[in-house]
Amino acid sequence: MVKIKPLEDIIRSHAFFDGLTPDISSLIAGCARNVRFKAGEMIYRLGDAADTFYVVRHGRVALEMPAAGKALCVETLDGGDILNASWLVPPYTCRFDARAVDDTRAIAFDAVCLRQKCDADSAVGYDLMKRFVPVMVERLTHARIQAMDLYAGGSTAQ
Amino acid sequence: MTAVSAQTDPYRPQVWRIVEKQMETADTATLALEPKDRANAMPFEPGQFNMLYAFGGGEVPISISGDPRETGRIIHTIRAVGSVTRPLIAHERGALVGLRGPFGAGWPVEAARGKDLLIIAGGLGLAPLRPAILDALHRRSAFQRIVILYGAKDPDSLLFLGDIADWRGRPDVGFDVTVDRAGQDWHGNIGVILRLIKAAHFDPANAVAFICGPEVMMRLAADELMARDLPQDSIYVSLERNMKCAFARCGHCQFGPHFVCKDGPVFRLDRIRALLQTPEI
């Protein structure tokens, strides 16, 4: 018989939530559910309300900017990553399209539910903020590195 | 002048013939060269470079990108970016070019024996690393893990597609590639190579890393490796400077107390890290 792992255990075993206290994991698990996306399925679109954020468990998600009938992909996210940090910041609007590149499993958090819990208990909000800010700073740094177009120059190592 | 005396004059190029040409991308070609005089064939170490001379155009340092076990020919991968490299890759099979070399200190592949070997390439930096990769794969059992991470601008910029397919298919090699941007037809990673380094499997207490690419990318990659506890003295980078004579006479490539053409282009990170962070150098 296959034993199903409780959602709270899944949350606590995810790299993003490493070291989460039982109290907080229990609290945020109340806003969470397991989700699956098939390869090619849109998870959300630019301009959608950022009412859900995800921690990716398995698979790959592309962040894309639609333009002139095409989509330019700016980053891919894999198992261990978080998706849709816009849930934290007004006006709570998705800034990119998110599309599953491969079959993807994730935990989806109801952002409205989570924001209410953060407002009610600042320790929860502070804990989550300490987890999100380094990821956001890292992604900003990576985006700046990509913007430098480092590989465009030709002569390196020639 | 005899061939022997010509070889003793380090300024005098030997005449080599292009025997194969393969366009890697729209602006990058791999040339296979053979000496016009077979007596001038020479061995090389992974990471070394030659001075290639486009007759009537000038001379540039170009890393060797071929298999060090292949004797009798030299492989160079060249991107057309200037007044010398453009005519070099415009040459077709049968054309003659001048060649001096090989020069410089290469990748210390032996230093990785018995250890995990991490190869981290950015853009055209895969070309100087390719001889080290081929050498290591030829004697695969001498190493623990071999991890090859490759970052490029976009899918059309990827070099050595045949090699990539081979490395990706090998169960004894950890290979991953990422590009800075791509369309929806690309199913691989998109993002900076730092993400691949962060996720790579290796033992920092028993690993050696070779990094080659744009200098900013090498610095950031080295920082990421050190954040994963790989010590500086286990990290090697390949520098590029304005190399002219190629044997530490002219001073054009001076880098603090070092001459990149002779002491490098491959350096152990702890020996040059402070210089890399000095804007004036």
Image (cartoon, coloured by chain):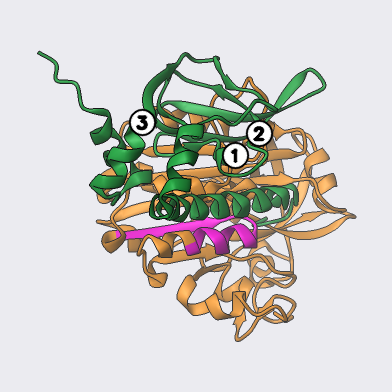
Chain colours: A green, B orange
Residue B170, labelled with which disc? 3
Q: Between marks 1 and 3, how big is the CA–CA gap?
A: 40 Å
x, y percentage for residue A136?
Answer: 55, 50
- Residue B250 in the figure: left or right of residue B176: right
Is residue B47 at least partly visible in the picture? Answer: no
- Residue A139 in the figure: left or right of residue A114: right
Q: Identify the element where label 2 is drawn.
A: loop
Residue B45, labelled with which disc? none
Query: Which residue sits at x=47%, y=52%?
Result: A129
Which is more toward the observer, B154 or A11?
A: A11
- Amino acid at dot 2: Thr
Question: Which chain is disc 3 placed on?
Answer: B
- Residue matched to label 1: A86
Question: Farthest residue toward the bottom?
Answer: B257
- Residue matched to label 2: A93
Judge whether B7 appears above or below A60 on screen. below
Which is more toward the observer, A27 or B235?
A: A27
Callout 1 environment at 10 Å: few (<14), some (14 to 19), or many (20+)?
Answer: some
Q: Do the residues labelled 2 and 1 touch (CB within 8 Å)?
A: yes
- Residue segment shown in magenta: B207-223
Q: Between marks 3 and 2, how big is the CA–CA gap?
A: 43 Å
Callout 2 environment at 10 Å: few (<14), some (14 to 19), or many (20+)?
Answer: some
Q: Identify the element where label 3 is drawn.
A: loop
Are tags 3 and 2 found on a single chain?
Answer: no
Are tags 2 and 1 found on a single chain?
Answer: yes
| Residue B253 lies in quadrant | bottom right
x, y percentage for residue A88?
Answer: 56, 43
